[in-house]
């Protein structure tokens, strides 16, 4: 039988900060989102205080002072590098891995003796901690959904030694009888609410429903989750990451923006970032969306939120073209007199560039644009991101509010740790 594992880094962003600052161990720590807006990573000590994921920073200021919670800004440079180290370590243990997110990866245990798997799981967790300093929970079972549940048990029961092997049907059912349905991978808030209204509160109760009822109420996606919980693998293992069908770049601003030109620079930056991601996967897009919104937390200020979808006559990956359309779209939805807190650009109708023919009536010199984009990407890759930009983005780099930013310990020689003996 094929067995799938899930390696899930515990409180990953917080754990990264603790690797280079051991004095944080055992203390309440939070990591904030872009512009220090809300909580996106919490230590167990913070969770015990009732701080929720996504909770705005201003709502927990009293708790921060009362319990001396250590606060850090998001340091994606550090976290990305630490993630790469974790993933490389995982790859050395199994035939194949599927990186699911910055702090999660599925592991394929095909061909490995089942009797050895419990020990291998503990060895993987121990080795990752030893090599990177990051604590990781290893869940192993018959399907991806069950492996997710197994990894959650590791965090709940320390005696498992960071590895849980769920194989026996009796053990699986015993776990599912107490596992909340709203915590099951693939069950969103809407489905969880619907299931609760129908008397389903645990994963086991969900598996007792008929497949016809599940498919009628939750479509084929819900039926796949139902089958996965019953031990039938329906979510394929994909070692190769598929191209994104939608690309989005958005930010909350450090301060409200009311000036159109200033807002346009930010939107141009977002469009440029999306274009880089698009070219990286060798794709082009045929539609672009721009959205802006004010700060809904400020009831004392006038509110406005709007978006516009711009169909492109010709699929493109050109930063120049996408910025032109994005700024044009912004002009249609911008309203003078409002202070905007967030904006973003979304690319959709994405297709492989090699499989998308150019239009005979295209007025843009695509060959010229391709050459320009190739040179821009090469320069930015060699000398750092945004070393060369379009005029629409301005010469000032996009600055986020990061008052609690830690050092780039692993990627910048100026920030390397100094040990005094």
Image (cartoon, rainbow, N blue to C red):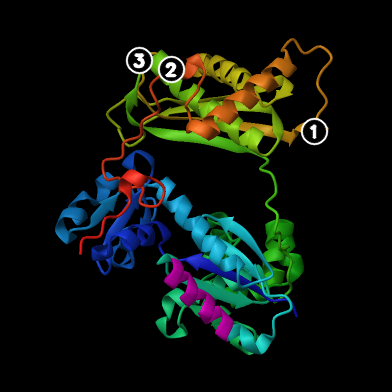
Vertical order, 404 against 6 (above or below): above
Vertical order, 347 against 338 (above or below): below
> Which residue position holds label 3?
337
Ranked by sequence position, the earlier of labels 1 and 2 is: 1
- Checking the image for residue 354, the label placed there is 1
The quarter of the picture where the C terminus appears is bottom left
Measured as percent of width and height from the top left, residue 342 is found at 42, 31
Q: Does residue 289 appear left or right of residue 227 in this picture?
A: left
Q: Secondary structure at mark 3?
A: loop
Measured as percent of width and height from the top left, residue 237 is found at 71, 63
Q: Decide: few, some or many residues near mark 2? Use Cα within 10 Å; few <14, some 14-19, many ≥20.
A: some
Q: Residue furthest left?
A: 66
CB under 8 Å between callouts 1 and 2?
A: no
Q: Secondary structure at mark 2?
A: loop
> Which residue position holds label 2?
394
**CA gap, disc 1 to disc 2?**
32 Å
Question: Front-most of 174 and 144?
Answer: 144
Measured as percent of width and height from the top left, residue 168 is found at 65, 88
Point out the frontmost of discs 1 and 3: 1
Magenta range is 119-131
> Can residue 42 be seen in this snapshot?
no
> Can residue 298 be seen in this snapshot?
yes
The quarter of the picture where the N terminus appears is bottom right
Ranked by sequence position, the earlier of labels 1 and 3 is: 3
Q: Residue furthest front?
A: 421
Question: Front-most of 73 and 343?
Answer: 73
Question: Front-most of 385 and 8?
Answer: 385
Ranked by sequence position, the earlier of labels 3 and 2 is: 3
Whether residue 239 appears in magenta in the rendering, the answer is: no
């Amino acid at each position: 039988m094929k067995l799938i594992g899930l390696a899930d880094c515990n409180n990953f962003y917080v754990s990264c900060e603790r690797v280079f600052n051991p004095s944080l161990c055992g203390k309440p720590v939070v990591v904030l989102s872009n512009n220090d807006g809300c909580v996106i990573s919490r230590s167990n000590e913070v969770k015990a205080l009732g701080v929720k994921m996504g909770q705005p920073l201003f709502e927990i200021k009293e708790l921060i002072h009362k319990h001396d919670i250590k606060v850090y800004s998001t340091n994606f440079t550090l976290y990305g590098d630490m993630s790469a180290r974790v993933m490389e370590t995982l790859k050395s243990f199994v035939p194949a891995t599927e990186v699911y997110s910055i702090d999660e990866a599925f592991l394929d245990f095909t061909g490995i003796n089942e009797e050895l798997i419990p020990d291998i799981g503990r060895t993987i967790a121990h080795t990752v901690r030893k090599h990177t300093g990051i604590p990781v929970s290893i869940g192993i079972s018959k399907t991806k959904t069950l492996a997710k549940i197994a990894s959650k048990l590791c965090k709940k029961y320390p005696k498992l030694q960071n590895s849980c092997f769920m194989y026996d049907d009796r053990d699986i059912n015993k776990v599912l009888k107490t596992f909340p349905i709203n915590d099951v991978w693939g069950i969103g808030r809407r489905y969880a609410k619907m299931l609760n209204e129908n008397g389903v509160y645990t994963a086991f109760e969900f598996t007792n429903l008929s497949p016809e009822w599940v498919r009628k109420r939750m479509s084929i996606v819900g039926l796949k989750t139902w089958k996965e919980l019953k031990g039938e693998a329906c979510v394929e293992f994909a070692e190769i990451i598929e191209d994104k069908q939608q690309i989005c770049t958005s930010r909350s601003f450090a301060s409200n923006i009311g000036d159109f030109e200033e807002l346009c620079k930010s939107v141009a930056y977002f469009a440029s970032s999306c274009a880089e991601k698009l070219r990286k996967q060798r794709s082009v897009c045929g539609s672009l969306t721009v959205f802006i919104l004010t700060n809904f937390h400020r009831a004392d200020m006038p509110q406005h939120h709007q978006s516009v979808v711009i169909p492109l006559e010709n699929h493109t990956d050109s930063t120049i073209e996408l910025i032109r359309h994005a700024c044009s779209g912004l002009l249609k939805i911008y309203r003078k007199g409002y202070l905007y807190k967030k904006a973003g650009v979304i690319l959709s109708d994405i297709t492989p560039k090699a499989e998308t023919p150019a239009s005979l009536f295209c007025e843009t010199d695509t060959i010229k644009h391709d050459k320009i984009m190739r040179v821009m990407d090469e320069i930015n890759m060699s000398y750092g991101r945004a070393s060369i930009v379009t005029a629409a983005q301005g010469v000032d780099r996009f600055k986020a509010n990061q008052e609690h930013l830690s050092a780039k310990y692993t990627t910048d020689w100026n920030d390397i740790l100094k040990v005094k003996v």
